[in-house]
Amino acid sequence: MRINQKVKNKSIEEPKEKLEWLLVLSAFFIGYFYIYVYQNIIHIEVKLLDFQTLIQMPLIAVVILPLIHYLVVIPDPLQRSPSKRKSVRFFQNEFPSKYILERCVRCIEDETSCPNYIKAESYAHIRYWFYDIFHGKIETVDPRRVRDTYEKGYHCKLLYYLSWILGVFLAFAIAIIVFHYVYQYFYNEYKVDLTSLQIIFPLVCGLIIILIKALNRPDESRPSGCWHAWREINRMHISWLAANKDYLDKLICQAGGGDKKFREKMIVTHANPDFDCIVAVWLLKRFCGMEDAEIKFMKFGEPIPSEYKGAAFVDIGEGEYDHHHRKDFVSSATLVLEKFNLKNDSVLEQLADIARQIDHGLPDERTKGFLNLINIIAGLNKLYPDDPLKVMTITFDCLDAIYKLTSPSFHFEEELKKGVEFHTKWGPGIAIETHDQELRGYCHRKGYVVFIYVDPVTQYRGYAAPGDKGVDFSDVYEKVKGLEPDAEWYLHFSKDLLICGSGKAANYKLSKLKLHELINLVKLDE
């Protein structure tokens, strides 16, 4: 059931009114303080707080309220502006309605074969999302999620527009200071010295703006603060849309009758597939919602069969994922990466970059050596010259394995930043609070001989070292037993592993030693 657009919804109006009043109050107090600070220059006498001021406050608020309402709240540039500012772009890119639009783009049907095909300029995807799904299906099932979405969205707007207001008064303050000195330079009889408050005011405005931006970064790869919360809530909505394909078919594809269903586009690429084309197709199928798309192969220059109409063409001489007609330094893989905004994943970015380097005939240090994926693909094409799909399928498994193995490395680097480094008689060591059991091996590969951990979830802790470094934790074992006789520490027969608590054994009496206490038992005195 479609909700009437004119019906006021409590979940919309409450946070919107709260936003408006908070912005009005912010503008009022910042503006009032601005006039108070610069009153000797602008010749308006104002006391910080007195009876007359209190009487005038409501009158001033009546003036500011319509200004905020008609200049900020109604136009709502963060949501509606075509601006390319980072904050605006981030906020709008997270709209779940884009998933509905991209779903039509990914469908094999087009505007000639489907009467309900959604074009970007129609805004139908926004209406479907907002009225039928968000304020229809989702609000009926989970009204709290709707309220949370508005609250998180208006939180972004509050901080964004507050930065605007501060920026305006910062500009006013700088302008009036510049005017003061210019006027004084040309008219020597004008002698008014700036007070410390008049210097501090723009500094404080600037500092608050910097603080807001530092704590709330609309970064595509790692947003923080309100922007992170905005992305999280919208990713939940997108997951819901992805899990309810049948509902979307009935709502959109079959609107007005008919039996149309969403059908994934074909992916068409060239026979004898190379690394660039394989990576591009792998990205489309694994990360771009085209996991069910059928892969077809053809040779360059062949006429395109009618049944391939609407397919995603990759590295085949035409289509948006082909680079042969372009002069800039791109490849099919990097075009997919750009199109679907996958640059926030460092592993995918590296794979696409390697594909670009190789495709342009440039050497790449990352593919040196006889046993590499480029050679394997060349060999597979010789083994299966008539079965390019098999070549792709095998290589997809290899890329899946590389991604599975490599992705944690970037997470591990973040974990390492939380670690405490120290020196032992066996070599360098690092101690970390972590629940990730794979981190130990990564630290050893990075050159740390001694790895100390405390698991904040299970409360397990221990010492570990590679088997070829001659490390013997026997002395440490005696020390921990002396400190905690009741704790059940286990020294492995190899002597290079000392742990208290393990998922392989039950009913351990766990140690309560802190991370720094464990470090002190092995580190060398500086």
Image (cartoon, rainbow, N blue to C red):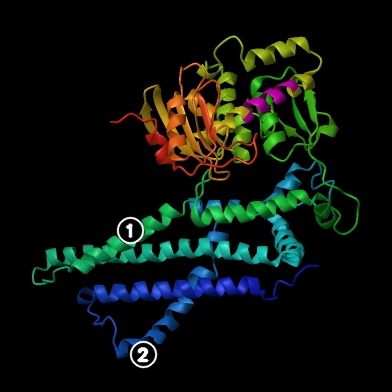
Determine the image quadrant of residue 165.
bottom left
Looking at the picture, does residue 386 appear above or below residue 108?
above
Residue ID at (31%, 90%): 52
Contact check, label 2 and label 1, Cβ < 8 Å: no
Q: Left or right: 199 with respect to 237?
A: left
Q: Give the residue type at disc 2.
A: Ile
Residue of label 1: 207
Q: Which residues are magenta?
A: 394-404
Measuring from the top left, give residue 36's x and y in whole percent: 27, 76
- Of labels 2 and 1, earlier in sequence is 2
Q: Left or right: 144 with respect to 203?
A: right
Determine the image quadrant of residue 215.
bottom left
Does the magenta segment cover residue 351?
no
Local crowd size for mark 2, using a 10 Å CA cut-off: few (<14), some (14–19), many (≥20): few
Measuring from the top left, give residue 301's x and y in whole percent: 75, 21
Residue of label 2: 55
Q: Give the residue type at disc 1.
A: Leu
Determine the image quadrant of residue 63.
bottom left
Quadrant where the image shows the N terminus: bottom right
Helix, strand or loop status at disc 2: helix
Structural distance between the alpha carbons of marks 2 and 1: 32 Å
Q: Nearer the viewer, residue 87 or 441?
A: 441
Measuring from the top left, give residue 337's x and y in whole percent: 60, 35
Helix, strand or loop status at disc 1: helix
Quadrant where the image shows the C terminus: top left
Measuring from the top left, give residue 200's x and y in whole percent: 24, 64
Looking at the picture, does residue 479 appear above or below residue 14?
above
Residue ID at (49%, 28%): 443
Main secondary-structure element of the magenta-colored stretch: helix
Q: Left or right: 44 with respect to 436?
A: left
Numbered circle sitting on residue 284? none
